[in-house]
Amino acid sequence: MKKAKLCLKVLMITGLLLSMMPSRSQTQEMDLSGTWGFQTDVMDFRRGSLSPRYKHALQGTIVLPGITDDYQIGYKVPYRYIDRLTRKYEYMGPAWYQRDIAIPKEWKGKRIFMYFERTHWLSSIFVDTKEVSKIDYISVPHNHELTEFVTPGQTHRITVSIDNRFQYNTHKWDHAHTEFTQINWNGILGAIKLVAIDPVYIDDLQVYPNITEKSVKVKMQIRNRTNKPVDGVASFTINGVNYQLNKKLDLEIKDTLALVEETIVLGKDVKLWDEFNPNLYTIKCKLSTKSDKAGYQHEKAATFGMREVAQGKNHVMLNNRPIHLRGTVENAVFPKTGHAPVDDAEWERIMKILKDYGMNHLRFHSWCPPEAAFRMADKYGIYFEVEMPMWGKDAEPDDARYHFFRREMRAILKEYGNHPSFVLYCNGNEITGSFDFIEELTADAKALDNRHLFSGSTARTRVKSDQYYVSQQTNKGAVKVYEGFPYTNWDRSKESDVDVPVISHESGQRCIYPDFREIKNMIKVLWKRAISKYSGAPG
């Protein structure tokens, strides 16, 4: 009898201890920056089925994050361009990056992803000798799922192909990959990592502010990869300066995808975001779920600002007030590196310069910046216009190209849509071709995300869904200022017959002479002596 009581007590204590144990550990990451195996592939052996690179150990090495230009890989350029800076080495084609990676045994049962913050253009992943994933976004990170192809506790050879050839017949001048501004680089920049998460996770978290009701509507997509119903709790925490709010939401998820919407009232103390008072809030959702005896956790966070943008008759309206956009164009001109920065420090420097000059607006001409640019614009109160890598004849009929732009537009809105600095969206620059397609893109974007204003194209044909318009002129007259008179009391709205706000396009283009003293700074991927014989700069 005593033995039976003792056994019962042990069972009770064991059960109590189990109930106190935390759920399975949540997200785990493995930093993959460092030395990788490397080999070029100018013959494109994979496409020709001739001894593809992933079947062999690669012969060279390279350090990531980085680009091939950093290591003088490719064709050594023997000439100098007169219409742009000249790369020292040019490489266009597949390049292969390889690493043997031990997958932690603790990752058993998790979903495993390989994440590249920014690459250019097509990335393909091979595990051992199998191709498992292919992504061709330009404007957002590449996030490849490897779950079904790797075994926790084993070492796998991971081979990555980065192909910077044009994947679609798109305009060769768009600033996402033109040689005229940033170069057509090959490589991987920013964060490079393996990420392991529990099989019930938040795939998307979007925040829609309502400044009248002082609330936010949260829209989440939750993936359930357990093949079983799960239930649990979503715990929200919202933090700001001298502000914190918590809320819990019970969940019951029966399918592989659950769409969750919840309105959270923030209270009277919540503050608005604009250029003068860039008040920011962070929302974090901790997802705790269980199925049978297994428990799962995942967290996802987003930064947002309490601001609403609307279309006025002659002005963009922010928080029910007209704003005067005073800005410049960012053409992806980064001659020291040949690519846009992905770190906060460099984008903070750029935002401070804008503020010092009294500006509040930055247009990204035919490209979309990385996450760090949005973070710093949020912090300093800069209004962004973001564009796809689209220019000129890109709207001419081409099903493959059309499908790429449809996916790219949705990816941009999903990846960066929470940022309060993301005020304006335009498909691209000076577009020609089928404006039925441009209207389709613009109308779909408006229906998908009301946190921004949308425009079909800069400086060309208006479309029905335009909420603002960027141009040099309208049918009634010019809406640009080229005269350069020393005063600022122009009223170009009197010359416009457009029924939406008009932003003057290219109103500040001027012919200037370069500062030859800057040549000495071009020491990495571009020739510092490109025009030295004309400047007298030392060689």
Image (cartoon, helix red, strand yellow):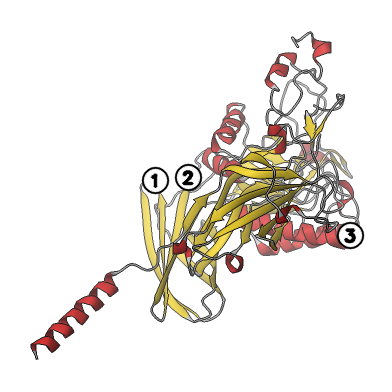
- Name the kind of residue labelled 1 in the image: Val
Q: Position of residue 356 (x, y in %)?
A: 58, 27
Q: Secondary structure at mark 2?
A: loop
Mark 3 highlights which residue? 398
| Residue 293 against residue 55 in the figure, above or below | below
Mark toward the start of the polypeptide (3 vs 1): 1
- Amino acid type at image mark 3: Asp
Q: Which residue is mark 2?
A: 279
- Real-space Cα distance between discs 3 and 1? 49 Å
Furthest toward the left, the residue is 2
Query: Circle 1 sits on which residue?
Result: 241
211 displayed left or right of 162: left
Determine if residue 214 is in view: no
- 521 shown above or below 410: above
Q: Earlier in the sequence, mark 3 or mark 2?
A: 2
Q: Residue at x 37, y 54 (%)?
A: 244
Cα distance in 3D space between marks 2 and 1 = 8 Å
Q: Earlier in the sequence, mark 2 or mark 1?
A: 1
